[in-house]
Amino acid sequence: MNKSNKPNFKLCEKLATKLLAMQNIDSSKIDIMNLNYDKTIIFDTIQNYAKLTFTPIEKFINPNTQLLSEGCCVPIKENGNEIYLILYNDKSQSDEHLNWTLAHEIGHIYMGHKYDSEIQEIEAHFFAAQLLMPEYVIYKMSTLGTVNVDDIYTMFNVSLQAAQKRLNTYRKKHYINKTYNDEKIWQMMERDIRNHYLYANSSDEFRRFLNIPIIDI
């Protein structure tokens, strides 16, 4: 757990990268519910949990918005083992937004957060960004062609807003980390990424053949 007064971005990136490298995947679109975890993590809806445990739904109202929380984590001790119950609101989120919410809660768990604070929220967001949109993979995308918000949105299971924020952060970087785990993740996602750029480049060539202008927005 980070006890300083600044977010530990390096640790966020390291732990998210390590978790992603543990997976056996062949797609760049990460489904948080279907990942393999080395911790006991259970997903359920807030609505179902409230019904099964007779907990008033009002307990899950976000005091800042006065709306039902998008997600939260309930740690449970059972026979000396720690179980993490991630609850989410299934009524108000798109699939991409829900995936981000779950990745955010996974970030809280792996970063060892014990309470909510501004720093811990920033860390959980950064963890989620690296887990869903790995920085080194974005760099490798840039070696194959232009990387814009639509490319990130298309290749990763995220919203347009999340894709734009990730691209903004990436463009501020002065260097890119490359570790064994980064390269392993790239190898798992490489086919998807290369197919995307192969299709994009083929489409551009076809439009040129038809004399249709290509407009960068």
Image (cartoon, rainbow, N blue to C red):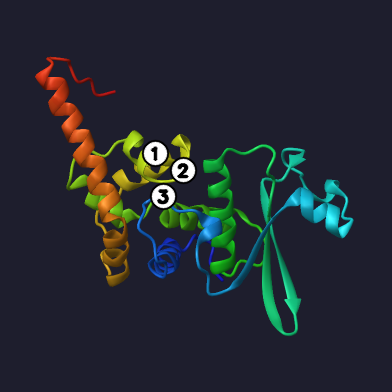
SS type, badge 1 = helix
Name the residue that disc number 3 marks.
29
The three-letter amino acid code for the residue at tag 1 is Tyr
Q: Are marks 2 and 1 in contact (CB under 8 Å)?
A: yes
The reply, left or right, for residue 127 in relation to residue 213 is: right
Which residue occupies the extreme bottom position in the image?
80
- As drawn, the label of residue 217 is none
Q: Quadrant of the N terminus?
A: bottom right
Name the foreground residue: 61 vs 82. Answer: 82
Residue 214 picture location, percent across and down: 19, 20
Q: Earlier in the sequence, mark 2 or mark 3?
A: 3
Residue 66 picture location, percent across and down: 77, 38
Q: Quadrant of the C terminus?
A: top left
Name the foreground residue: 77 vs 176. Answer: 77
Q: Residues within 10 Å of mark 3 (few under 14, many from 20)?
A: some
The image quadrant that residue 44 belongs to is bottom right
Q: Earlier in the sequence, mark 3 or mark 1?
A: 3
Tell me which residue sits at (50%, 68%) in the image: 36
Compute the Cα span from label 2 to label 1. 6 Å
Name the residue that disc number 2 marks.
158
Q: Residues within 10 Å of mark 1 (few under 14, many from 20)?
A: some
Name the residue that disc number 1 marks.
153
Residue 56 picture location, percent across and down: 88, 50
